[in-house]
Amino acid sequence: MAMLLQPPAAEPLSLAEAKLVLRVEHDTDDDLIATLIAAARRHVEAVTRRALLVQTWRLARDAWPASGRIAVLPAPLRTVVAARVFDAAGTARAIDPEIFTLDPTNAPGVIAVAPHVPRAPGRRTAGIEIDVSVGYGETAAEVPAPLVQAVRMLLAHWYANRAVVAETSAQPLPLGVAALLAPWRVLLP
């Protein structure tokens, strides 16, 4: 299980950039446009299983894997921020993040715990928590251009079709979005 702890501090498009893309010169729709930017980013992240900008996620596991390897999604993995194991009473015991070996080049990223497997959790469910930092970087300039372009295309599509309310009349997503995202999708083993 993975849970978002801290979302990105910014979006891959600023409001000003988005308004240029949309050719909007008024401020009336600023809140709507900001919401659509965030929604487009989240959609791209969900489809690709990648975090565009740096964010913190918590991975919860019931036990240490026999392989000694923990796959991390969303990709790309940056660092282990913190880790803890819970005893039977529910008390968290911190684990030094330095004991983990990271392979951030793979997607999904991998955290290797062997040969230094910490103590087994005493709690049956979610007895292990590992907080990780994921994402390409702090700024949009560090995000691969095709992923930012997909955000732009989704934003433009959703802004142009914002009045569509009936499911039967909903416009399909632009084909270009799927083409841009296909090579970036993280496939699960």
Image (tube, grey):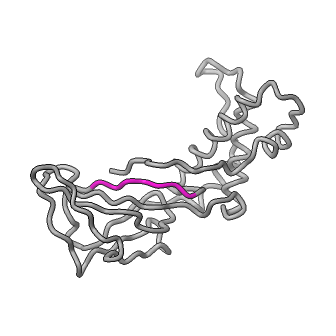
The C terminus sits in image quarter: bottom left
Left or right, 154 with respect to 187, comes to: right
Image: 76 above or below 160: below
Of 179 and 45, nearer the camera is: 45
At which x and y percent is residue 165?
63, 19
Q: Tell me which corner region of the image, top left, top right, bottom left or bottom right, holds residue 168.
A: top right
Q: Nearer the viewer, residue 39 or 28?
A: 28
Q: Is residue 82 left or right of residue 63?
A: right
Residue 140 inside the magenta-drawn segment: no
Q: Residue drawn 47% across and 55% down? A: 56
> Outermost residue, top direction?
166
Query: Which residue ends up furthest to the bottom in the rendered image?
Result: 115
Numbered disc total = 0
Quarter of the figure with residue 43: top right
Taking the magenta stretch, the answer to whether it contains residue 59 is yes
Measured from the top left, where is residue 180 in percent x and y? 67, 55
| Rendering coords of residue 186 (x, y %) | 49, 60
Residue at the (81%, 24%) spot, across then down: 28
Instruction: Name the foreground residue: 166 vs 2.
Output: 2
Please tell me which residue lies in front, 128 or 72.
Answer: 128
Image quadrant assignment for residue 37: top right
Please give the range of residues in magenta. Answer: 54-60
Apparent side of residue 39 relative to residue 86 in the rendered image (left or right): right
The residue that appears at 60% across and 50% down in the rendered structure is 9
